[in-house]
Amino acid sequence: MLSFRTHLAAVTGMDDFDEETVLEAIHLADDDILMLSGSLVDGSGTPSSDFDFCVIARSKDDRFHRDTFPRSRHMRYYTSGDRVKASFDYLPHSLLGVDVEYRTRDEVTDMLAAHARLYAHQRSRARKSSAFAHSAVDFRVLSRLSYGVPLTNAAAFEELARGVRPGEIAYTAFRTAVGSYPDFRDLVGMWAQGDHESALIAARKLGVDTFRGLSHAHGNTNRNPKYLARFLDRLPLDRELVSHFRRLHAYGVGDGADAGEAVLEWLDLIDLAFDGIRAVRDKADAFVGRRDFLDLLRNELHDGMRWNAEISNEYCFRAREAEDGLPPLRELLTAMTARSAAPHHLPLREWARGRAAPVGENDKSA
């Protein structure tokens, strides 16, 4: 009998289960690749997690169509038009569930090619990217391919997996995650109004995004923030930094009167996260290195710009993922609240000299 129990990470409080009952929910064909992945494999699972399987078929068959899908035992299934994408079931007398995605080998190959285009696009720009939404990439599937375990047809899986480049997946995740200047600018506006509670919500988002970026710089391919603290615990990071993040993220502040100080505490923590990103990004082969990233920033500047404090502060914020010695975010917050420029050493006008305005882009990679 096909067995997968040995591939599961230890989960405290997990109910026992019958493997045959789990496998009955999959509807496996002989030449399918069956991949096991998800939180029960990567070690972030809980007693209410699902067994996450992906069936990668040679081509579409009756399981891929609404009217012929063998769903008699399933509680629900997900479709896009006629196309069945996934099925979901619960195990009796257990918190555990069974999720099965249905893909074809061509679909996975096409997704890997789309991701390669997305990665090339993101390497050419320095801004936080929303191109993922246009890219025809299911990032969750790509992440799972980077660590999934083939339970059947391992040779076919290995052939397919040659196109999976975890470092590149981590970089596209980083580029869509790491904290952005528009988010910081929103925070400043709330702070300037004296709305410290809203500023705290914005600071928490900026902090989570930046720590997600830090985890991706260390090779994490999972974009889902719900287990971020668990991912950070596994990385070679300063334990005090991780503990500080966990405390602020999980417990926040006890009283609204403390919101302003908590915003500043978050900004200090975000500065430390950026320190961590700078420390490792040159060692991550698939990442745009620090000097190359600054070149991307430099190429955005041109002689026709109307120089003002806003432009100076924007590049002071954005350059910190690659440049040392920039003023801390507390100082940037103070300067922007006063409608002035924070002092920094970036030679923005020198970078702009002799450059024409760059051609616009449509934010699409495919």
Image: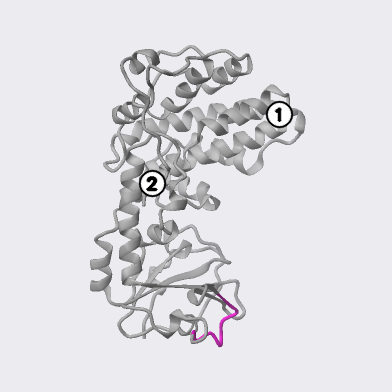
- Looking at this view, is 131 or 58 the one in front? 131
Q: Are there few (<14), some (14-19), or many (20+) residues within 10 Å of tag 1?
A: many
Q: Nearer the viewer, mark 2 or mark 1?
A: 2
Residue 235 in view, yes or no: no
Residue shown at 62% from the left, 25% from the top: 188
Viewer-closest of 287 and 185: 185
Check disc 1 and report the residue beneath it.
Answer: 196
Left or right: residue 7 versus residue 251 is: left
* Marks 2/1: CA–CA distance: 32 Å
User: What mark, if any, has residue 172 been given in the picture?
Assistant: 2
Q: Is residue 270 above or below residue 221?
A: above
- Quadrant of the drawing holding the N terminus: bottom left
**Helix, strand or loop status at disc 1:** helix
Q: Which residues, given as a range, are shown in magenta? A: 69-77
Q: From the viewer's perspective, tell me whether residue 283 is left or right of residue 100.
A: left
What amino acid is found at the position of numbered circle 1 in the picture? His
Q: Is residue 151 left or right of residue 178?
A: left
Q: Residue at x 30, y 82 (%)?
A: 31
Q: Residue at x 49, y 57 (%)?
A: 44
Q: Position of residue 19 (x, y in %)?
A: 46, 81
Q: Amino acid at mark 2?
A: Thr
Give neighbour class at mark 2: few <14, some 14-19, many 20+ (Cα, 10 Å). many
What secondary structure is found at the residue carrying circle 2?
helix
Quick check: 66 above or below 104?
A: below
Residue 156: where, in percent of width, then height?
A: 25, 73
* Residue 96 seen in the figure: yes
